[in-house]
Amino acid sequence: MSDQTYRIIAIAVYMAAMLVIGYLAFRKTDDLDDYMLAGRRLRPTTAALSAGASDMSGWLLMGLPGAIYAFGLVEAWIAIGLTVGAWLNWTYVAPRLRSYTQVSKNSITVPTFFENRLRDSSHLLRITSGVIILVFFTFYVSSGMVAGGTFFESAFGGSYLTGMLLVAGVTLAYTLFGGFIGATWTDVVQGLLMLAALVVVPVVAVSNLGGVGETIEGVRAADAAANAAGADLNRLSLVAGGSVIGVLSAVAWGLGYFGQPHIIVRFMALRSAQDAKVGRRVGIGWMVLIASGAVLSGIIGVAFFWRDGEILANPETVFLDMAAIVFHPLVGGLVLAAVLAAIMSTVSSQLIVCSSALVEDLYKIAGKEASPQKQVVLGRTGVLVVAVVAGLLAINPSGTILELVGFAWAGFGAAFGPVILLSLYWRRLTRQGALAGMITGAVVVIVWGTTALGDTLYEIVPGFLANLLVAVLVSRATAVEQPEIEVEFDEAAAQAARA
């Protein structure tokens, strides 16, 4: 068989496994709580791997190694910032959010939690946050479909449209029928596949080069040759070629975790607040390994291809190209499947959050009541609607879509992050303060990110700080005594403290 045939077999086996998992999850989904939150019975290991896989998209196996290959370890600060942010999220948000969302009228979505926590009878908080989620994630999902089409085009030489439709179709199928359970179970498999690929590829590549010492010498030799040609590279340094603002912007990516709906919804689905401790250990352990693997793949790739006198035309293929050289085509196909896993796990999680925004946060606000079975049907309809719109956008991707997706992480982090933290840790937050802060954070990110200011400091920093400041000032100006909120706050805090 040809190398291409082996790769196709590996991808086909992976796709079939995802569909089987989706079917098994379908048989365990009875009502909307199951479809959106797995009935709050997610084990901590499952939640940790699912949160990690839904967070890490194709940039982990392509974008990050490519940046390291091209510029060196100075690009690793983003991985450091994300790891620190994830640890803080699991430590301070996960246990408190799990307890508070159940205490506060069993809230199963982030917008519903805001409304219940702050007693917003106007529904403005729920509507605003639901619309923010729906708009940004529709473009985010579209971006994942574009990545899938581009991946198939470059890896197999096939049609972009065929690849995009295949990735979208399989992801939609297991998400549409399996819901949150299906997305979570597939995330676990995808997370383990990504972990295996990112551990094995750099280890085998270093062995192929002759060891760690030879690898380091190869990187230095490649830098010396590039510098002789006029470059200014020191790829083994964490600071060479960087700046204080640049490092701050990279590390600031960690702030985004506090406001990512598709990640923090995993905290809400835990069996109890006590499970957050185990989840943190598993999740951060997984993250350290895969981030290290991605960084090492990029730096090892410098020596690997320098040995053969080769300079990659597209640095983002460094991980895939190394895997294709050092492994049998069937194993190389499984590495390709790991890239698809990164893309599809993120898309499926975002589809579920979009569905919840449509059904739980917008449909129910209209006063519509439905049976548990009809609510699940509505949830699936929401997934289908968002997927179709995202797919139409992905058929002919434009710069506008890619630009929006580029600062979507900052948008969610700045719009929701401070409000989440204040909701959990400051009893005096008011609905007016939360709404004003949320809108301020989103607007600052959009203005900062679409002007020349975006070339200076990452927009999440001013957006996050502006939200925090406005939310606190407006809350102090509009604070009134609300005994019911006080009791609820203390109960949630007490439950979380036992975790």
Image: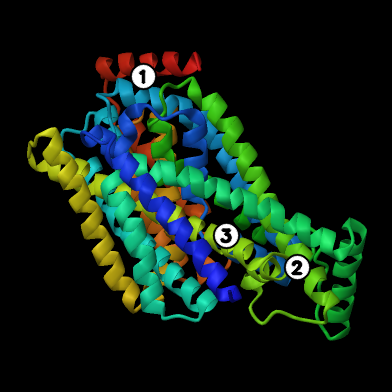
How far is disc 1 from disc 3 in space, using C-alphas?
A: 48 Å
Q: Earlier in the sequence, mark 1 or mark 2?
A: 2
Task: From the viewer's side, name the closer residue of 317 and 468.
Answer: 317
Q: Position of residue 407 (x, y in %)?
A: 45, 61
Residue at label 1? 489
Residue at mark 3: 334
Residue 94 appears at what percent x and percent y?
Answer: 47, 30
Residue 32 in sight? yes
Could you tell me if the residues under marks 1 and 3 are in contact, i.e. CB atoms within 8 Å? Answer: no
Residue type, mark 3 in image = Leu
View extreme (front): residue: 1
Helix, strand or loop for disc 2: helix
> Residues under labels 3 and 2: Cα distance?
19 Å
Residue neighbourhood size for the residue with mark 3, other residues' Cα within 10 Å, grouped as few (<14), some (14–19), many (≥20)? many
**Which residue is nearer to you in this view: 65 or 71?**
65
Q: Residue 179 is drawn in which quadrant?
A: top left
Which structural element holds mark 1? Answer: helix
Residue 369 is drawn in which quadrant?
A: top left
Residue that mark 2 sits on: 301
Comparing marks 1 and 3, which lies closer to the viewer? Answer: 3
